Image (cartoon, grey):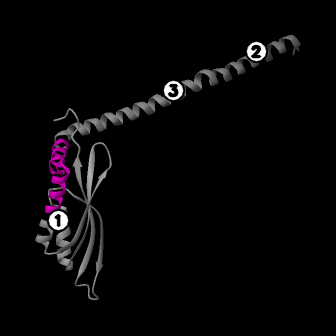
Amino acid sequence: MNFDPKNRQHQLLLITVVVVGIFLGDRLVLTPLLNTWKARSARLTELKKNVTNGEALLKRADSLQSRWAEMRTNALPAEAPVAESRMLRGFDNWSRTAGVSVSSIRPQWKRADNDYVSLECRTDVSGSIGDVMRFLYEVGRDPMGVKVDSAALATRDTDGAQITLALQVSGLQLIPQKGSK
């Protein structure tokens, strides 16, 4: 075995340069490339998911457009007095059909967004349990499209023959957009 210190130093220097080169190659080239690859793969997966969702929406476009047209048709009229009148007529029809008595109706307008306004009505209804349930059924099936926000039942007598329903419903009034039909 021939021991040459210069040759050994040269070999150690070469090994050190190779190790540092591999380390720098990993940190400066390989790791960023792998991170970019992973990010692009995730983005590609997200885009494929968006395309699938878009295709599903396109397949359902006709039904979604007819549902939106139905919602626009059943929304409250654009004029506030006409909308309130329609809501009050609805309460009158529901109570007459169900055979309940309405003690008060308190309408209040709520502006939630630039696209729509809602008319919230709080009311107290009383009658037998069957009549009150029929009233709720009539509210839910009406084409006007009101939403029951809250309902609370209470009884006035010990045997529960007379039920009082505290109800809050809201109706939607769409605000016409400028430049739309």
Label 1: few (<14), some or many (≥20) within 10 Å? some
Image coordinates for residue 35, horizontal then vertical, percent? 54, 29
Residue range of the region highlighted in magenta in the rendering = 64-91
Estimate the spatial distance between the alpha carbons at disc 2 and disc 1, rounded to whole Å. Answer: 92 Å
**Residue 97 at what x, y percent from top left?**
11, 70
Residue 150 relative to residue 142: left or right: right
* 3D distance between C-alphas at marks 2 and 3: 31 Å
Residue 121 appears anywhere in the view: yes
**Mark in the foreground, 1 or 3:** 1
- Mark 2: which amino acid? Leu
Q: For mark 1, give the secondary structure.
A: helix
> In the image, what residue type sits under mark 3?
Thr
Question: Is the residue 42 above or below the residue 126 in the image?
Answer: above
Q: How many marks?
A: 3
Name the residue located 13 percent from the left edge and 75 percent from the top edge: 99
Residue drawn at (18%, 67%) of the image:
137
Q: For the C terminus, which image quadrant?
A: top left
Instruction: Say if residue 4 shows up in the picture.
Output: no
When the figure is inspected, residue 35 is found, relative to residue 74, above or below; the finding is: above
Tag 3 or tag 1, which sits nearer the N-term?
Answer: 3
- The residue identified by callout 1 is 91
Residue 22 is a magenta residue: no
Could you give the CA–CA distance between mark 1 and mark 3, rounded to whole angstroms?
Answer: 61 Å
> If you read the primary sequence from the N terminus, does the residue marked by circle 2 or circle 1 appear first?
2
Residue 86 pos. (x, y %): 15, 57
Q: In the rendered image, which residue does mark 2 sit on? A: 14
Where 173 sits versus 53, above or below?
below
Tell which circle, 2 or 3, labels the residue nearer the N-terminal end: 2
